[in-house]
Amino acid sequence: MGSLIVSAVVNCIAYADGLRDKNLEIGTISEALKQPDRFIWIGLHEPSEELLRHVQKEFGLHDLAIEDAHRAHQRPKIEMYGDSLFIVLRTAQLNNQQPRIEFGETHFFVGSRYIVSVRHGSSLAYTDVRARCETKPQLLRKGPAFALYALMDSIVDQYFPIVDALELELQALEEKIFSETFSHDTTAQIYELKRQLLEVKRAVSPLIDICNRLMRFDLDFIAVDTQPYFRDVYGHAIRINEMVDILRELLTTALEANFSLVSISQNEVTKKFAGWAAIIALPTMIAGIYGMNFQWMPELSWHYSYPLILILTIVLCIFLYMRFKRSGWL
Amino acid sequence: MGSLIVSAVVNCIAYADGLRDKNLEIGTISEALKQPDRFIWIGLHEPSEELLRHVQKEFGLHDLAIEDAHRAHQRPKIEMYGDSLFIVLRTAQLNNQQPRIEFGETHFFVGSRYIVSVRHGSSLAYTDVRARCETKPQLLRKGPAFALYALMDSIVDQYFPIVDALELELQALEEKIFSETFSHDTTAQIYELKRQLLEVKRAVSPLIDICNRLMRFDLDFIAVDTQPYFRDVYGHAIRINEMVDILRELLTTALEANFSLVSISQNEVTKKFAGWAAIIALPTMIAGIYGMNFQWMPELSWHYSYPLILILTIVLCIFLYMRFKRSGWL
Amino acid sequence: MGSLIVSAVVNCIAYADGLRDKNLEIGTISEALKQPDRFIWIGLHEPSEELLRHVQKEFGLHDLAIEDAHRAHQRPKIEMYGDSLFIVLRTAQLNNQQPRIEFGETHFFVGSRYIVSVRHGSSLAYTDVRARCETKPQLLRKGPAFALYALMDSIVDQYFPIVDALELELQALEEKIFSETFSHDTTAQIYELKRQLLEVKRAVSPLIDICNRLMRFDLDFIAVDTQPYFRDVYGHAIRINEMVDILRELLTTALEANFSLVSISQNEVTKKFAGWAAIIALPTMIAGIYGMNFQWMPELSWHYSYPLILILTIVLCIFLYMRFKRSGWL
Amino acid sequence: MGSLIVSAVVNCIAYADGLRDKNLEIGTISEALKQPDRFIWIGLHEPSEELLRHVQKEFGLHDLAIEDAHRAHQRPKIEMYGDSLFIVLRTAQLNNQQPRIEFGETHFFVGSRYIVSVRHGSSLAYTDVRARCETKPQLLRKGPAFALYALMDSIVDQYFPIVDALELELQALEEKIFSETFSHDTTAQIYELKRQLLEVKRAVSPLIDICNRLMRFDLDFIAVDTQPYFRDVYGHAIRINEMVDILRELLTTALEANFSLVSISQNEVTKKFAGWAAIIALPTMIAGIYGMNFQWMPELSWHYSYPLILILTIVLCIFLYMRFKRSGWL
Amino acid sequence: MGSLIVSAVVNCIAYADGLRDKNLEIGTISEALKQPDRFIWIGLHEPSEELLRHVQKEFGLHDLAIEDAHRAHQRPKIEMYGDSLFIVLRTAQLNNQQPRIEFGETHFFVGSRYIVSVRHGSSLAYTDVRARCETKPQLLRKGPAFALYALMDSIVDQYFPIVDALELELQALEEKIFSETFSHDTTAQIYELKRQLLEVKRAVSPLIDICNRLMRFDLDFIAVDTQPYFRDVYGHAIRINEMVDILRELLTTALEANFSLVSISQNEVTKKFAGWAAIIALPTMIAGIYGMNFQWMPELSWHYSYPLILILTIVLCIFLYMRFKRSGWL
């Protein structure tokens, strides 16, 4: 096999009785499977089609599953081909430098004596998960089902910090909304947050069904005592879903509240404007009248007309001001 | 065991035939369980991991349940590990000084001869519940299932005053909305109320499923004659849910009504402003015309021009005023 | 027994073969039940706890049901305690003087040889229902199940005039909305109607499930030939529900239409205002220009300047008026 | 029997082996039923209670069904009383002169050897359906079930032209909405269309459940080979439902789009108004300044002040005009 | 048979053991079916009723299915008539010149030894699909079920580029919305996109049920090893559905965001207008006052009144400008 193929193989290890037995070459798997009480855990990263075909031959995997695993861009799903499971999950990571969510995909082939993970796009390597499993041989002894649980659990748990980050973003938006300075950016950010919530929901919600079916499948390699583990993953998936749904509903309400506040502000601006317009228009009108050029306008020749008119106008303006103030227009 | 551990143990009592038998040390539980026809009711409050591990050993509890009970921040749920139930509920209390809802969490481990409650965060102690149960030995004789019912019932009943408080808040908001003084605060309060309703719903709605599954589980320690009790809790959970849903729908309508009223008010303000603007602009225009400095403006030299123009202008303004009044603009 | 107790007993009658046998004292029920082929129909109105406890003893009713029946304020529901049914329904009546809906509650205890109705709050007495049943002994012969049907049917049928009244109210609101005089009252009434619809829905919608379960319960005292009767009640409950849902959807659309009409009106007001403002501002501006005091303004000294400028201004205003008219602004 | 009764009998015919055997009097039905291999198809139109009671006696129909058939105003439903089916459907017709939908009701009683149709309100007579059935004796031979299918199919097919008409109405509304002349009528028509869609949905949606149950009922007179026919009706009902749902969603979006367009127009009007107001207010202000009567205003005495100020003002206005034009305000 | 008929027959080929056996005339089908281990794959394009009747006779198809296949305009559905399947699917293609979606319809008749496809309206011919199948005889050997899968898969896959195109359209709309130049066209395009999404959803969503039922039907010609293929189609249908739903929700939010931005812009325009109006109205008012013609106005005769008043006015305007600037009105 070429080096290109091998570089895609992150790990390929046989386990006996929950303990690491030895590292294998992809080509020696069938050999290794001849020994009883062993299972093989392979980790691949964006493998070539050639490598996948090789793995297919070793474990007798289904054509459709291999095609899916190669093409990627699948919806999270679980399929049972004969006595082999094929699971697709979406992974997600926060890119902290440029705060957005990056999605990837992981595919699992699980049989009674093997588990193969195939990573695509943005996701953490599963070496940590493998290391943690190897510290608990009494659990890893349960076989590939426990490894599957450990991998799924680690994928689902990556969504919690993401949902927390989205929650923080909503809080920041709320502050902007209720601070009453309405900007186009706030609306654009609400829209962007909605899009991200929908993407997270789309990645997580199929997990509920996947866990459900994992527990219902009558497979001998998913022992009764591993079911609580999958129920645990199921619970986490439900919780993330619920958090996303609440964020979505709050976001909708926030958009409406934003809208409502803009209306209220518009109302206040109009009232303020109308009030001051009246206060300025009145003296302008009075001044206009005494600016007329009629020959016979007796007031013009009276000595105290000017101060009287000025005072009258000011009094009227003060009266208007107080009336508007009282009725909340100013 | 250290004093830190012991301080987390609120109570640890064995019951025989519905009657309090004796207080136990955590360390003597296995001893006590040797006597038949006894069950043990333990109340813990934010226990250390060490204490939880101890309890785990005594009753043979599942790892995942113990981890959940220690980490808290779980979604309400019910899990069956072997012949032991693990239940997570969210508790809630009104903080009256600073009117907001404080949530806590209580976890239950229930087996055929024990019940362990683990309180986290804000919640009342369950000593009252225990006291009330002890006054009804004929019911407590039914075993841990009845104690579980009593505890769940007391948790669910704490939501009724909360929902009532939220209902009062909505009524206060309605009054503000329909009093036609639109403030930013009202909108912010509507948003805050929505958030609280969603949190209560999130805490209560899983209870429906939990009660349902409690009745469906085929467990020998949930006797047929305790099922009506869990159905009672179920009914209360449904009622709280329904009340929250109605409040949510009313709140949505209230937000829309608020919005609609702001629009109507805006409409009225604009009409009023337009009306008065016309009434002031007309004399200003007429005055402007007679303020022109043309040499040949015959009206200027006529003797009664000034009063005539004044009267004409006033008549026009009155006409405008009445027309606007009639068409509802003023 | 005290007179207070007895006053709460509206009726207590034994029936034999569909015919009224004799009036009973509450205390003699067990006696009467010794005779075969008889069933007892008791009507209570806001009974004291003492009376309820007495009835409980006579028929062996469950504690939880008696507590519910005493406390009232339950959600409509059906419970089966042993071989006895407990049903809670919400009754409703239009208060015509002050047009609002008054809700009450009726509880039923039904066994193979008895039916007890317990009325709370606003509801008609069931003497009419009893009278109508007694005219059809061939049906009443079917036992308490038929009496239960007759009572439930009469309760459900009381919702039809209520829904009709709400429909009339919506029609009145529609007329107000489309008459284009937008008032705060209309919006407040829309909100109030929404609240009433939600309350009616909350009272009626559980009935669908109750009827469904009544037909599914395998009880010997609900004979196969009474099932069509409960299906009839079920059909009525569905119909009321559907009517309420349609009213809710129309109401939502009405609120949106109201809102939309206010906007359109605002648009028209603004256009009209802008148009007239232009028509008034133009002559004001021209007059202002010829009101300037420059020494060298040749037009001022020309003889026909004044009438020419006046005519020019009027022509400009007419031109503006026609342009605005054509583009729909005036 | 009186003539009043007979006039309500549209047709009463016995069929043998899919062929018309002979016309019957209502009174001779039991006679006719004695002959084997015959079934009777009766068409009634708004029958009197007396006639219905007569039919009830002949076929042994259930009281509740007869009451429903007489009172009408039922929700579409299907009931099985013993070995007899009772079906209620809502019929609809477009009234072309005054374009609105007129609803009627048809009830069917179906047994193994009879089918009775009872028409109420607006609906076509079923003589056409009967005629078409009689041209296919090989199908009519299947018995009353096929006649039922033919009648139901003809009722459901009447909804297609109605939904098409509603679709055309929506298209007409869309044109009005996007032509940007906002009128109160358009909003009122949107509301009216929504009401009609809800009425059609209410009439058609129960049909899905009715067809479903027709196929599930284990009745000997609904042979396996007639089931595809009811599935056909079922498919049509689903399609109408779906069309109505899409129209409803489009209508909601249309109302929102209308609203949005009114807002955009309001925005444009305000900008245009503000722009022109500025262009007119500027010369007014300048003219005002040179209209002041100060004794020492050197500009007033300069010879070219007037034309200079005029030109300056005009230049400023042109500058404003171009700036507003560039920023899209004019 | 006439040439008109033959022109509608795109292909009519018998397959033996997954390999093309020979082209057939429609008239010789029954002959060909006498040989065992053969199945026939016929492709028709808008066939005449005569041709359909001919095919019906050859394979014994059901009347209702043939009627549907001839009339077209059906909702996607699956029907089982005896041992023959009838499937209706909607096909779709992007018309690139005039960017809109063109829908067509394809009907399938599938039996244990035949598959007939009937194309109506806009769709690609299935010759490519057939060619691809013929390259995999090991799969085509599975019989008509595999051919059905290949055809369905190709139809469903045509929706992916369409959904991608709609997604691009939404992105273009988003840019327009957030660029803050609100045009009527954007709203009209949002509406049009909504309509297209609803049409795609209507075409694709029934596919989920169709695939589901295909897997549940207990038909001998759908072998267990072809089920994963239909599950694959099912997965694609779900994915398209999900993408359409997300686009719909984003579109709704986009419409609201657009609306919200228009409001914010309106708010800003009003503030800007009010601010500038005040800055222009103030000097106009002051100028008006000193334009009054009172004989005794001492300021008029002071020598520096004019420059002082001018400076005062300018200072006031600058003060106003800065105040408005600070409060965000300008």
Image (cartoon, coloured by chain):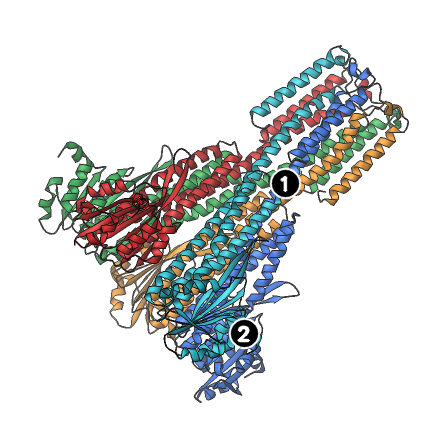
Chain colours: A orange, B blue, C cyan, D red, E green
Q: Amino acid at mark 1?
A: Gln
Judging depth in this view, the residue of D41 and A2 nearest the camera is D41
Q: Nearer the viewer, residue D57 or D219?
A: D57
Relative depth, front residue between B95 and C115: C115
Q: Residue, x 85% and y 28% (percent of image)?
A: E305
Name the front one of labels 1 and 2.
2
Crowding near the residue tagged with mark 1, few <14, some 14–19, many ≥20 C-alpha atoms within 10 Å: many
- Residue name at image x 43 percent, y 88 percent: B36
Give the quadrant of residue A130.
bottom left
- The chain letter under disc 1 is B
Taking B210 as reference, is B256 left or right? right
Instruction: Point out residue A309 in the picture as x, y percentages from the top left corner.
Output: 84, 31
Q: Is residue B104 above or below residue A121?
A: below
For mark 1, give the secondary structure. helix
Q: Which residue bears the numbered disc 2?
A: C6
Instruction: Assign a secondary structure to mark 2.
Output: helix
Q: Which mark is residue C53?
A: none
Compared across the picture, whether E222 is left or right of C252 comes to left
* Residue closest to the far front: D2
Q: Return the x and y of residue B237 as percentages of the image width and height.
A: 49, 66
The answer to whether D233 is drawn above or below residue A138 in the figure is above
Residue E125 shows up from this direction:
no
Q: Which residue is mark 1?
A: B266
Image x and y of residue E6, in percent = 16, 35
Q: Are marks 1 and 2 in contact (CB under 8 Å)?
A: no
Q: Amino acid at mark 2?
A: Val
> At 36% from the left edge and 64% from the top edge, which residue is drawn?
C139
**Residue B44 position within the rendered picture, expressed as x and y whole percent measured from the top left:** 54, 77
Query: Of A134 and E120, which appears nearest the observer?
Result: E120
Badge 1 and badge 2 both on one subunit: no
Write down the chain letter for disc 2.
C
Separation (CA) of disc 1 from disc 2: 62 Å
